[in-house]
Amino acid sequence: MRFFPKETNFFLLFEDYARVIEASGQLLLQLNKKANRNGELVKKARRLELKADDICHTIYQETNTSFITPIDREDIYLLARTLDNIVDLIENIISNINVYGIKKLEPNFKKFIDLQALTTKHLAQLINLLKDKEKHLPEIKKLIIKINYFENQGDELIREEFRLLFSDHKNPVEIIKWMDLFENIESVLDECEEVSYLVEDIIIKNF
């Protein structure tokens, strides 16, 4: 007879999330090669977004029903929610590029896409190290610093792009479209940085 419920491996669930995060970032990267064939990417992004929602729901459910969790429940909720935000933002970017009928990407947006692909890749590595955080502290610290550096680069890029958007006298509708896309992709980097801070807090609490 089982007196205690089976323990949920939350770290495996977060590793599933890491795979979805990296896959989403790589999917967005494909826009640099084929922005004019975005329709197929929209479907793939939607599938990844639904998968992320399923993982998030499972994490919430297991957190609510687990007798013991490896880290604070509040941290589990925050981490899952922020990771879900990243996938939602990427799906929204890919979808809106299609809705807006954009066939050619702004040069700085291409740079941003490259930057988010790097950031989401590093973030996935960071999440995968959570399970054995005590063994990988130096690697974790390096990844957190890199993610912060990428986010700072994003801040510089968006300032430059907004200056260009308004100085090039573009159609106001086009300006609105691009401002939305740039703000969303900057938010991807912001949320990645937020996850890195959450991981840092988790390590401090549990070391």
Image (cartoon, helix red, strand yellow):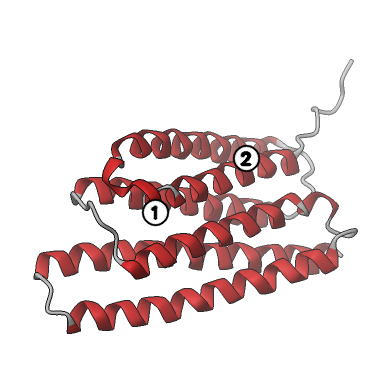
Classed neighbour count for the residue bearing mark 1: other residues with Cα under 10 Å, few (<14), some (14–19), many (≥20): some
Quarter of the image for residue 1 reads top right
Residue 112: give x, y in percent of width and height: 43, 66
Q: CA distance from mark 1 to mark 2?
A: 33 Å
- In what element is the residue under mark 1? helix
Which residue does the image show at 60% across and 74% down from the upper left?
Answer: 148
Label 2 sits on what residue type?
A: Ile
Is any part of residue 131 visible from this angle? Answer: yes
Quarter of the image for residue 56 reads top right
Residue 150: give x, y in percent of width and height: 56, 72
Which residue does the image show at 22% across and 77% down from the upper left?
Answer: 165
Looking at the image, do the residues carrying marks 1 and 2 touch, with CB atoms under 8 Å apart? no
Residue 135 lies left or right of residue 46; in this view the side is: right
Q: Which residue matches tag 1?
A: 32
Say which of marks 1 and 2 sits in front.
1
Give the mark nearer the N terminus: 1 vs 2.
1
Which residue does the image show at 63% across and 58% down from the upper left?
Answer: 123
Which residue does the image show at 39% across and 54% down from the upper left?
Answer: 32
Quarter of the image for residue 15 reads top right
Is any part of residue 74 visible from this angle? Answer: no
Residue 134: give x, y in percent of width and height: 88, 60
Residue 183 lies left or right of residue 15; in this view the side is: left
51 or 198, nearer to the observer: 51
Q: Which residue matches tag 2?
A: 59
200 or 62, nearer to the observer: 200
Label 1 sits on what residue type?
A: Asn
